[in-house]
């Protein structure tokens, strides 16, 4: 394996040489020191490093550079190497910009020029950053290669799982030479894909998500049988609850059935979240929240599906799909919602083979110069349209209403209007899909006239509302007619507390009909469906958990 890279960027050749010289002198035996003269040049270098499967440990960028300043470069670099530690070189006059960059690009440190002597002003900083990078899960992950077919739903499922869990991998087609060689070495054939191969030569044929999680170092087994707080669901509300629960001294475990981040984690750009004026990708926000939860001592379990909840004296007992159980003093339900399936003939069999639910960002590079169809008129659909417009020849947004104003934020509507490649089709719905190995054709219908037309299409992304995943709570906590968990004052009807309520008080604001079980985020009835409100409810739920525990 090649040494990890330390990359320095400065448009002043003298400064660039000095930075590289000082870093190489101390770290050259363990790291490959690379320098670039501009932000665009450095991004090209990072793309090459990414393609080779190498790792980047530290990025050192000068603030004042033409074309692209250091902050802009670091923000772009985060999408390629989110785990790399980031340092900004500044003059004294630019320290204000450096402080602003701490929030914008999650800056780890800024250094004033000159940094001499390096033994006092440079090396201690880089030592600490390298130590933190080495300890991070991403830094320890070796290259994973996935061999599969282009239009294979199981192959897509593996890639999507790795991408949503922020695990870097290399995608190889089974009918290409390198993919064929890997299959032969693994004793597999093209009929066995997907095949996942680690850097040390271990191969898994058609692995389950639990097998994948163990392979890449995700935690799947709880360290204890009993906790102060179990959080079910790893979206913004669940991550918020895990961060606040662990940081306030509660022994906390978060249980997620697939990948942290939820629907928000799939968003290409969230631009109305407080504190990020230039926007933040769902993956970046998820990664920061996950690292924050781990830093405070929360446990994160992946690929564990909760299928039952019961009262066990003063404890609350969760049952997993494998029959095992986990107990806690309190539970926060933050399971969010799932996208509804598009009920049209021909689409079900093409799911994962041209028909996708959610953004499926892994597919974007394959859409180059092709038409992409997006169904839905809410923010998630708008964000996906903006993202896919970077790759596709044209993005068609299909909505049943007359316009987007009823369901999409105005800032997103304005963005869509400014992008020539995006066309919004009002009063339009998908009524059928067809294709052999993959989606090849859609039938669209005008909702006003009933007129139908067929269009050639290989890519359909569906965002048509959502449903809560709460069937496993039936008969345990009160739910409304759509399956959302009812909480707080909504449980008190005509001055009467919910049936079976055992405490001499009304339910707390986010508390369900089972004392000690709280709901936060999209799964809660009448909640505001926004990332910020979900995070806030996760934090609020923890404060109510404290109140509940103090009264026990």
Image (tube, grey):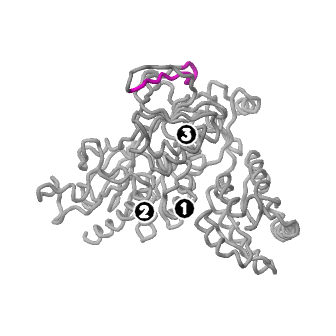
As displayed, is residue 168 above or below residue 365?
below
Question: In this image, 339 relative to 498: left or right?
Answer: right
Q: Report if residue 441 lies within the magenta region.
A: yes
Residue located beneath label 1 in the image: 276
Q: Is residue 468 left or right of residue 490?
A: right
Q: Which residues are magenta?
A: 435-447
Does the magenta run of residues contain 194?
no
Q: Which mark is residue 252?
A: 2
**Residue 151 drawn at (x, y percent):** 60, 27
For the C terminus, the quadrant is bottom left
- Could you tell me if residue 34 is visible in this image? no
Crowd class of label 2 (few under 14; some 14 to 19; many from 20; radius 10 Å): many
The circle drawn on residue 544 is none
Indicate the position of residue 270 as horizontal and vertical percent values: 52, 53
Out of 348 and 528, give the one closest to the viewer. 528
The residue that appears at 45% across and 27% down in the rendered structure is: 430
Tell me the SS state at disc 2: strand
Q: For numbered disc 3, what is the local secondary structure?
A: loop
CA separation in Å, label 3 and label 2 = 30 Å
Q: Residue at x 17, y 57 (%)?
A: 492
Inter-mark Cα distance, 1 to 3: 23 Å
The percent coordinates of residue 460 (x first, y second) are 52, 31
Helix, strand or loop at label 1? It is loop
Distance of label 1 from label 2 (alpha carbons): 28 Å
Which of label 1 and label 3 is nearer to you? 1
* Mark 3 in CB contact with mark 2 (< 8 angstroms): no
Specify which label sits upstream in the sequence, 1 or 2: 2
Query: Residue 6 falls in which quadrant of the image?
Result: bottom right
In the picture of the structure, the residue carrying the numbered disc 3 is 360
Q: Residues within 10 Å of mark 3 (few under 14, many from 20)?
A: many
Q: Is residue 188 visible?
A: yes
In the shown orientation, is residue 426 left or right of residue 158? left
């Amino acid at each position: 394996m090649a040494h990890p890279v330390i990359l320095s960027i400065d448009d002043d050749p003298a400064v660039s040489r000095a930075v590289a010289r000082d870093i190489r002198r101390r770290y050259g035996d363990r790291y490959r020191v690379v320098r670039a003269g501009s932000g665009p040049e450095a991004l090209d270098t990072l793309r090459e490093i990414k393609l080779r499967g190498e790792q980047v440990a530290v990025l050192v960028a000068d603030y004042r550079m033409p074309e692209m300043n250091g902050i802009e470069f670091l923000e772009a670099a985060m999408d390629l190497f989110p785990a790399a530690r980031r340092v900004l070189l500044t003059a004294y006059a630019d320290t204000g910009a450096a402080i602003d960059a701490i929030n914008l690009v999650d800056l780890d440190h800024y250094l004033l020029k000159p940094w001499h002597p390096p033994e006092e002003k440079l090396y201690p900083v880089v030592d600490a950053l390298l130590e933190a990078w080495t300890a991070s899960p991403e830094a320890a992950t070796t290259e994973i290669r996935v061999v599969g077919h282009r239009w294979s739903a199981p192959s897509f499922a593996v890639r999507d799982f790795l991408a949503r869990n922020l695990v870097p991998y290399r995608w190889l087609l089974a009918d290409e030479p390198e993919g064929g060689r890997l299959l032969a070495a693994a004793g597999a054939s093209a009929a066995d894909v997907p095949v996942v191969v680690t850097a040390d030569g271990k191969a898994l044929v058609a692995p389950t998500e639990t097998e994948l999680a163990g392979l890449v170092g995700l935690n799947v087994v709880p360290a204890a049988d009993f906790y102060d707080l179990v959080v079910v669901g790893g979206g913004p509300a669940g991550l918020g609850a895990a961060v606040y629960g662990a940081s306030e001294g509660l022994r906390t475990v978060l249980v997620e059935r697939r990948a942290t981040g939820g629907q928000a984690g799939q968003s290409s750009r969230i631009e109305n979240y407080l504190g990020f004026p230039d926007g933040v990708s769902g993956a970046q926000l998820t990664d920061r929240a996950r690292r924050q939860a781990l830093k405070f001592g929360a446990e994160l379990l992946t690929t564990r599906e909760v299928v039952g909840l019961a009262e066990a004296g003063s404890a609350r007992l969760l049952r997993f799909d494998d029959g095992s159980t986990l107990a806690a003093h309190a539970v926060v339900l933050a399971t969010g919602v799932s996208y509804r399936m598009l009920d049209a003939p021909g689409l079900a069999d093409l799911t994962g083979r041209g028909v996708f639910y959610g953004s499926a960002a892994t597919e974007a590079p394959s859409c180059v110069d092709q038409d992409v169809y997006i169904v839905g008129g809410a923010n998630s659909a708008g964000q996906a349209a903006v993202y896919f417009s970077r790759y596709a020849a044209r993005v068609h947004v299909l909505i049943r209403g007359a316009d987007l104003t009823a369901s999409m934020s105005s800032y997103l509507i304005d963005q869509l209007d400014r992008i020539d490649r995006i066309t919004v089709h009002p009063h339009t719905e998908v009524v059928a899909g067809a294709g052999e190995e993959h989606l090849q054709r859609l039938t669209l219908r005008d909702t006003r006239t009933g007129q139908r037309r067929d269009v050639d299409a290989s890519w359909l992304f569906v965002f048509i509302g959502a449903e809560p995943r709460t069937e496993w709570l039936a008969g345990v906590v009160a739910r409304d007619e759509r399956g959302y968990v009812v909480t707080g004052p909504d449980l008190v009807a005509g001055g009467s507390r919910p049936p079976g309520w055992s405490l001499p008080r009304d339910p707390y604001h986010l508390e369900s009909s089972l004392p000690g079980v709280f709901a936060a985020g999209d799964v809660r009835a009448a909640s505001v469906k926004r990332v910020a409100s979900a995070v806030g409810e996760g934090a609020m739920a923890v404060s109510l958990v404290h109140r509940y525990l103090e009264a026990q």
